[in-house]
């Protein structure tokens, strides 16, 4: 499908000058450098974030202390490990600033900080792994659905609790809905999640038994992947957590408001079967430099397959800087 030239594509605003002003105010209240990591509801922690973080770190230089603002619903745990490893190479001490949601893989990122400062609206979550496998079950829209270790374990437990003497093996029935290879892949992913947490904690927590205890607790102690772990609960888990300074929390909320305006949905409808998506998904910003990942693609609904497929995909990372007082945006190529 070709883009219709008569249709004006909706584009979100780039508010770099405004966000830089708030970052300047934030750094005046801190004894170190500041980096913001923000993702929209459709964005996620991913491996390409690492390259963007590296560029921001080069811009601000090595620091004795770094403050990392994290707002994200999660993503790839292995990418979180790589981000923490990179940050620890450039900074002696890291403090995570969490005014809002910091879920799943974003919680893993926070675990890499020496301290976590949480505001009144902040929460971490469990980090148990759910997996979307090539052989996963599909939903009514013909998309593969994610399956978690906890879900499978609960089905098996309920089966055993209600089983009669003549009941057949539960796996025989479950395999009709969940492929055996998915079971194996999820078990492997769960072990990986615990390993990642232990490795991230090792950057500042020297007791291996404590690292193991915290990692297993965050992976298996909660009935929901999205269970909100607030400040007091995080302290009970054994994390080094304290309240976020009120004035600093207000500035971070203001920064989040600007990022939310930048990350608003930017949909242009062509007709009932075609539309264009121009949403900004991830933002990484420090003093003097910012990177964002922006969708730039058409979507077409294939009726015979009952699913949306992307077309003309030009989505990419962009580098934003101020040169001679003017905002300059360049494509940042990551492969």
Image (tube, rainbow, N blue to C red):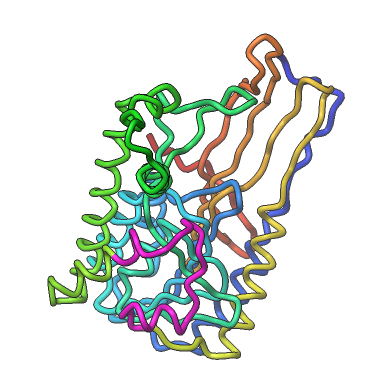
Q: Nearer the viewer, residue 65 or 271?
A: 271
Measuring from the top left, give residue 237's x and y in whole percent: 34, 77
Residue drawn 83% across and 33% down? 8
The reply to whether residue 53 is visible in this rendering is: yes
Q: Is residue 202 left or right of residue 231?
A: left
Q: In the rendered view of the protein, which quadrant contains the N terminus?
A: top right
Measuring from the top left, give residue 40's x and y in whole percent: 60, 53
- Residue 85 figure quarter: bottom left
Q: Is residue 142 left or right of residue 94?
A: right
Residue drawn 54% across and 52% down? 282
The reply to whether residue 289 is visible in this rendering is: no
Residue drawn 53% across and 64% down? 71
- Residue 213 figure quarter: bottom left
Q: Nearer the viewer, residue 303 or 8?
A: 303
Point out the residue furthest to the right here: 6
Instruction: Give the residues in magenta.
Output: 217-240
Measuring from the top left, give residue 43's x and y in whole percent: 55, 48
Q: Nearer the viewer, residue 326 or 28?
A: 28
Residue drawn 55% across and 81% down? 119
Q: In the rendered view of the protein, which quadrant contains the C terminus?
A: top left
- Residue 223 within the magenta-colored segment of the rendering: yes
- Residue 114 within the magenta-colored segment of the rendering: no
Measuring from the top left, give residue 308's x and y in whole percent: 65, 23
Q: Nearer the viewer, residue 29 or 185?
A: 185
Placement of 44 over or under 224, stated as above or below: above
Point out the residue furthest to the front here: 165
Number of labelled discs? 0
């Amino acid at each position: 499908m070709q883009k219709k030239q008569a249709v004006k594509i909706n584009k979100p605003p780039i508010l770099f000058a405004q966000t830089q002003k708030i970052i300047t105010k934030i750094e005046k209240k801190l004894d170190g450098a500041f980096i913001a990591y923000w993702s929209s509801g459709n964005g996620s922690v991913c491996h390409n974030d690492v390259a963007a973080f590296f560029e921001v770190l080069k811009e601000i230089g090595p620091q004795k202390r770094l403050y990392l603002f994290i707002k994200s619903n999660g993503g790839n745990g292995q990418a979180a490990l790589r981000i923490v490893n990179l940050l620890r190479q450039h900074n002696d001490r890291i403090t995570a600033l969490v005014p809002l949601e910091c879920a799943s893989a974003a919680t893993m990122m926070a675990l890499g900080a020496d301290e976590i400062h949480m505001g009144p609206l902040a929460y971490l979550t469990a980090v148990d792994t759910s997996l979307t496998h090539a052989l996963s079950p599909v939903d009514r829209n013909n998309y593969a659905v994610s399956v978690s270790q906890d879900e499978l374990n609960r089905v098996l437990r309920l089966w055993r609790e209600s089983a009669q003497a003549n009941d057949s093996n539960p796996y025989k029935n479950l395999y009709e809905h969940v492929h055996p290879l998915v079971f194996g892949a999820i078990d492997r992913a769960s072990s990986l999640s615990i390993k990642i947490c232990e490795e991230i904690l090792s950057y500042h927590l020297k007791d291996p038994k404590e690292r193991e205890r915290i990692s297993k607790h965050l992976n298996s102690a909660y009935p929901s992947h999205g269970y909100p772990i607030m400040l007091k609960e995080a302290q009970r888990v054994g994390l080094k957590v304290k309240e976020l300074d009120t004035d600093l929390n207000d500035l971070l909320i203001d920064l989040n408001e600007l990022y939310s305006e930048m990350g608003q949905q930017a949909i242009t409808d062509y007709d009932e079967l075609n539309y264009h998506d121009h949403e900004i998904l991830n933002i990484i910003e420090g003093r003097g430099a910012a990177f964002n990942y922006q969708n730039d693609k058409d979507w077409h609904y294939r009726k015979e397959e009952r699913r949306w497929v992307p077309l003309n995909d030009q989505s990419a990372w962009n580098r934003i800087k101020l040169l001679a007082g003017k905002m300059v945006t360049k494509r940042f190529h990551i492969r």
